[in-house]
Image (cartoon, grey):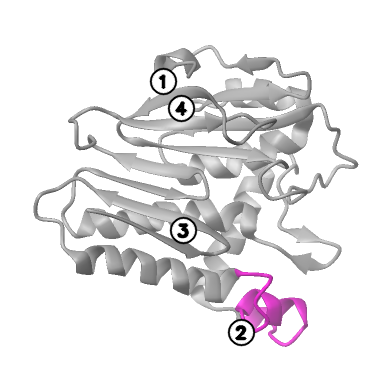
Amino acid sequence: MKRTKNLMGMHITVEVNDPNCRKESIDKVFSYFKYVDSKFSPYKKDSEVSKINRGEIRQSQYSEGMRTIIKLAEKTKNETEGYFDIWHDGQMDPSGIVKGWAIYTAARILDIEGYGNYYIDAGGDIQAKGLNKRLKPWKVGIKSPFNKAEIVKVLKITNGGVATSGTYERGEHIYNPKGKMGDDVRSLTVVGPDVYEADRFATAAFAMGRVGINFIEGKFGLEGYMIGSDGVATFTSGFSRYAVSNS
């Protein structure tokens, strides 16, 4: 069973390759994404994030979910030497951590529902488990940052997550807290044990510029694929085990 909806400002696809898949299970996943958008979007005026940014909610009044996100963001900031920060000029934008966290949590819904083969794609960030309908690993394409219709690398993922950071998909949405970010890196894809880990470190590594791929190389369990503004790709030492082809 496969369904796609437009939520959180992006296309979200959920595919479950289990014969006993129930429509209600996929409905739960989309309902969860809708809840996340209503709470954490900095673009919705009634979200908790927007109310915090307007000073309408004090820290003591934050919801449990908001406290969780802030705690995870602070952990990531410490693990990336400050390159990951959800606070910019006194305003909160947790998008860099909420997306991967939401996909990962949505996948847990499918786990609880008892499914062993599924694929969740939210705006190009993916959590996959088990096998596809051909009983093969799920295939994930890395788009060219110069031509979104072109796939430059195909990955095979069985149990793990993939996330790509770059300014070409949604414009300048990644902030470098340590100063002006150069334009020498166009995209950076990270493969990890789950999409939450891949997403948060992809965001931070992209903000680091060219040295970001070295940062990913040094993180246990993560592999990366960086495309520079010159079109040249650089990848970590273990990345090739995920690659299927160049087309």
**Outermost residue toward the left in this view:** 20
Instruction: Assess disc 3: are there few (<14), some (14-19) or many (≥20) residues with their C-alpha within 10 Å of its C-alpha.
Output: many
Give the image quarter of residue 204.
top right
Where does residue 138 sit, x and y in percent of width and height? 32, 33
Sequence order check: which comes first, mark 3 or mark 4? 3
Sequence order check: which comes first, mark 3 or mark 2? 2
Tag shown at residue 61: 2
Helix, strand or loop at disc 1? helix
The residue that label 4 is drawn on is 221
The residue that label 3 is drawn on is 102
**Outermost residue toward the bottom in this view:** 56
Taking the image as drawn, is residue 231 in sight?
A: yes
Sequence order check: which comes first, mark 1 or mark 3? 3
For the stretch drawn in magenta, what is the main secondary structure? loop
Sequence order check: which comes first, mark 4 or mark 1? 4
When the figure is inspected, residue 81 is found, relative to residue 212, above or below; the finding is below
The residue that label 1 is drawn on is 242
User: What residue span does the magenta drawing correspond to?
Assistant: 41-60
Give the image quarter of residue 133.
top left
Sequence order check: which comes first, mark 4 or mark 2? 2
Query: Mark 2 belongs to which amino acid?
Result: Gln
Q: Nearer the viewer, mark 3 or mark 4?
A: 3
The front one of 217 and 142 is 142
Label 1 and label 2: CA atoms lie apart by 44 Å
Q: Nearer the viewer, mark 4 or mark 2?
A: 4
Label 4 and label 1: CA atoms lie apart by 13 Å
Where does residue 62 sit, x and y in percent of width and height? 60, 79
Query: Mark 1 belongs to which amino acid?
Result: Tyr
Classify residue 10 as left or right of residue 111: right
Where does residue 129 sit, x and y in percent of width and height? 28, 40
